[in-house]
Amino acid sequence: MANKELKIFSGNSNPDLALAVCKGLSLPLGAASLRTFSDGEILVEIGENVRGQDVFVIQSTCQPVNGNLIELLIMIDALKRASARRITAVIPYYGYARQDRKVAPRVPISAKLVADLLTAAGSSRVLTMDLHVGQIQGFFNIPVDNLYASPVMIRYIKESFHNDLVMVSPDAGGVPRARAYAKRLNADLAMIDKRRDAPGKAKAMHIIGDVAQKQAVILDDIIDTGGTLAEAAKTIMEHGAKGVYACCSHPVLSGPAIRRVMDSPLKRLIVTDTIPLGDKALSCPKIIQLSVASLFCKAILNIHCEDSISSLFEIQF
């Protein structure tokens, strides 16, 4: 495909995914120079004409979160000032999504602040994947398309597990997602009741549902420090499961996460490439990474051609 009106640019957060998307669309990656001054300020220079064109900027706001976010905002501003017709911020992983409401007095709603910043910078629309909570879409006054990693995840689960499968939600909030997977995989459903004592720390208490003599797959959207996952895997095995696995869309894997995964009863952790894996994660034998580039290819092409992408919003095979 060669279309002079469609251009794709990438920040520094996830260049491999951006290149995979460009390959899938048979398009070159847009020319842009991103430099950092000695004091930490970021300079972006767009290296080609984008006047009147449909531009997509691929940038996950993963670690370093603040640097990648500012880089994305500056790229959008540069494209706006270069007279791009429409600028779509493609954010495979939307950082600050867990700060989506006031859980204590005098705390921010940072997910809303990020939405305001993206809009003020000049974004015409946002394309993201597996938002931590769907209501974040309502923080924007521009169109937001929230894709799901389910097509690649369900395909992998269907090919890898055949009998005695139970989908496990690590908390009450994830039950609708786990139920949707269980329905399409003809699997059982369970939930872990947990108590969170502090941010990044959780203690699994007990399981609602039956996991005995079954292959359990924990389904979550984000794995950060791995504390919840490790406790969940331990609790599931204590309840008689034959084996425990996990799937997550966004492998943040910060701090002691890799060590916790290795020390846990998990047999495999299946993740996507919305966030690039670090060297420790890449060398971890338990971690398997699946690509969601094809989903973003289809979404970008359909948005550009003004076609519907509603099929990508459904959990499906």
Image (cartoon, rainbow, N blue to C red):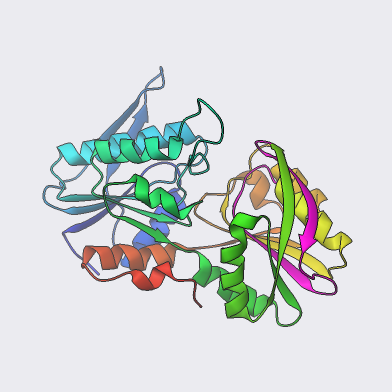
In the image, taking residue 89 as reference, residue 128 lies left or right, namely: right
For this rendering, which residue is in front, 96 or 290?
96
Report x, y in % for residue 262: 78, 51
Report x, y in % for residue 154: 57, 73
Q: Is residue 222 magenta?
A: yes
Q: Residue at x 23, y 49 (%)?
A: 124
Q: Residue at x 82, y 49 (%)?
A: 263
For this rendering, which residue is in front, 72 or 127?
127
Looking at the rendering, the stretch of residues picked out in magenta corresponds to: 198-226
Question: Looking at the picture, does residue 270 appear above or below residue 314?
Answer: above
Q: Quadrant of residue 189?
A: bottom right
Q: Quadrant of residue 120?
A: top left
- Residue 46 in view of the camera: no
Kindly give the residue lying farthest to the top in the view shown: 39
For this rendering, which residue is in front, 12 or 301?
301
Q: Looking at the rendering, in which quadrant would you find the N terminus?
A: bottom left
- Residue 45 in view of the camera: yes
Report x, y in % for residue 2: 21, 66
In the image, taking residue 174 as reference, residue 307 lies left or right, namely: left
Report x, y in % for residue 196: 70, 41
Q: Is residue 59 magenta?
A: no
Report the number of discs. 0
In the image, taking residue 90 as reference, residue 216 lies left or right, namely: right
Q: What main secondary structure does the magenta stretch of the protein show?
A: strand
For this rendering, which residue is in front, 270 or 122?
122
Q: Residue at x 86, y 64 (%)?
A: 239
